[in-house]
Image: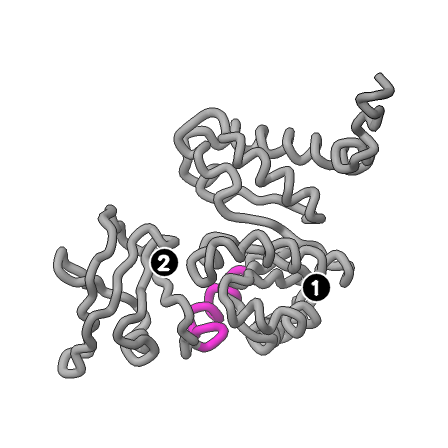
């Protein structure tokens, strides 16, 4: 268990996977720690905390640029999937998919339960998943672009480019794609989104996404209903603009030369 001096993680292989000088990030990058020393005797990492913040329990851990030696699905994952199948679920969103075999392992569980109709949407959240995306898409039913962990695993400035690329590939393959994470993040505490968030949702639609998704905004925010209603309005407005071809092309503007006016 963790203490105020030590942080406990559930993945014992983290010690062997990382290296001195590398970084370990917590809670979608909220807290950044640099590894100063590896304590071989106790299998502990001695880290320097680079920024202050409050770290709660059960938060995500990322090691950017590191290939984690975890199986695609753990034994607990398999048990959870079987439980879900017993409840007649329709979709599985598979986190941190890194290679096609991760999806094929889940398909084996579907076959075991004779529920091959259940669709699998991989969440691409790491550089390894991005590198293997073409092969992953071939064995998947769709895609979820989960930008929270992705923005920690790869440079933040690359996220918009990756988002556009993955959406286009899904469009060409005729497979549905969902864009998710921090789309209206400020609405966890405020009744209205920032202008940047409204633009983010709209631009995902303009990129070709088939769906936009809320997370913390509707799961534990103060304005869940307002968040859903706001996102729906932005999506509808953006889709109408796409259909009319007015808001997205230069033809929408008056091309009259100033000298002609």
Q: Is residue 80 magenta?
A: yes
Residue, disc 2: 60
- Crowding around mark 1 (Cα neighbors within 10 Å: few <14, some 14 to 19, many 20+) is few
Q: Within the image, what quadrant is residue 100 found in?
A: bottom right
Q: Position of residue 13 (x, y in %)?
A: 32, 77
Marks 2 and 1: CB-CB under 8 Å? Answer: no
Whether residue 113 can be seen here: no
Residue 172, given in percent of the width and then of the height, sits at: 77, 60
Residue tagged by mark 1? Answer: 117
Count of numbered circles on the image: 2
Q: Secondary structure at mark 2?
A: loop
Dominant SS type (magenta): helix
Tell me if 170 is positioned left or right of 198 in this view.
right
Which color scheme does this rendered protein use?
A: one colour
Query: Closer to the N terminus: mark 2 or mark 1?
Result: 2
Quarter containing the C terminus: top right
* Residue farthest to the front, as pictured: 259
Q: Is residue 92 magenta?
A: no
Of circles 2 and 1, the one toward us is 2
To which quarter of the image does residue 163 belong?
Answer: bottom right
Query: Is 77 placed left or right of 229 in the picture?
Result: left
Quadrant for the N terminus in the image: bottom left
Q: Residue furthest top?
A: 261
Q: Which residues are magenta?
A: 71-85
Give the CA separation, mark 2 to mark 1: 31 Å
121 in relation to 43, above or below: above
Residue at the spot 18% in from the left edge and 69% down from the top edge: 46
- Pinpoint residue 109: horizontal percent, then vertical percent: 58, 73
Q: Residue at x 75, y 37 (%)?
A: 248
- Foreground pick, 249 / 234: 249
């Amino acid at each position: 268990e963790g203490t105020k001096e030590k942080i406990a993680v559930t993945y014992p292989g983290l010690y062997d996977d990382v290296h001195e000088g590398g970084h370990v990030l917590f809670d979608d990058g909220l807290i950044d720690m640099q590894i100063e020393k590896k304590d071989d005797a106790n299998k502990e990492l001695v880290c320097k905390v680079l920024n202050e913040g409050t770290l709660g329990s059960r938060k995500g851990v990322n090691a950017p640029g590191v290939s984690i030696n975890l199986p695609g699905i753990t034994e607990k994952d398999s048990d959870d999937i079987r439980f879900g199948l017993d409840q007649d679920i329709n979709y599985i969103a598979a986190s941190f998919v890194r290679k096609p075999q991760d999806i094929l392992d889940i398909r084996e569980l579907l076959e075991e339960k004779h529920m091959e109709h259940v669709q699998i949407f991989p969440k691409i959240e790491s550089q390894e998943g991005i590198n293997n995306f073409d092969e992953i898409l071939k064995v998947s039913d769709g895609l979820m672009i989960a930008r929270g962990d992705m923005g920690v695993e790869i440079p933040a400035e690359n996220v918009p480019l990756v988002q556009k690329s993955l959406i286009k590939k899904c469009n060409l393959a005729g497979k549905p794609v969902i864009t998710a994470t921090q789309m209206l993040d400020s609405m966890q505490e405020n009744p209205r989104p920032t202008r940047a968030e409204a633009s983010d949702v709209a631009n995902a639609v303009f990129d070709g996404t088939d769906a936009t998704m809320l997370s913390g905004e509707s799961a534990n925010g103060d304005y869940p209903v307002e968040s859903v209603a706001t996102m729906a309005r932005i999506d509808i407005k953006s889709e109408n603009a796409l259909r009319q071809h007015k808001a997205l092309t230069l033809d929408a503007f008056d091309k009259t030369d100033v000298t002609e006016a």
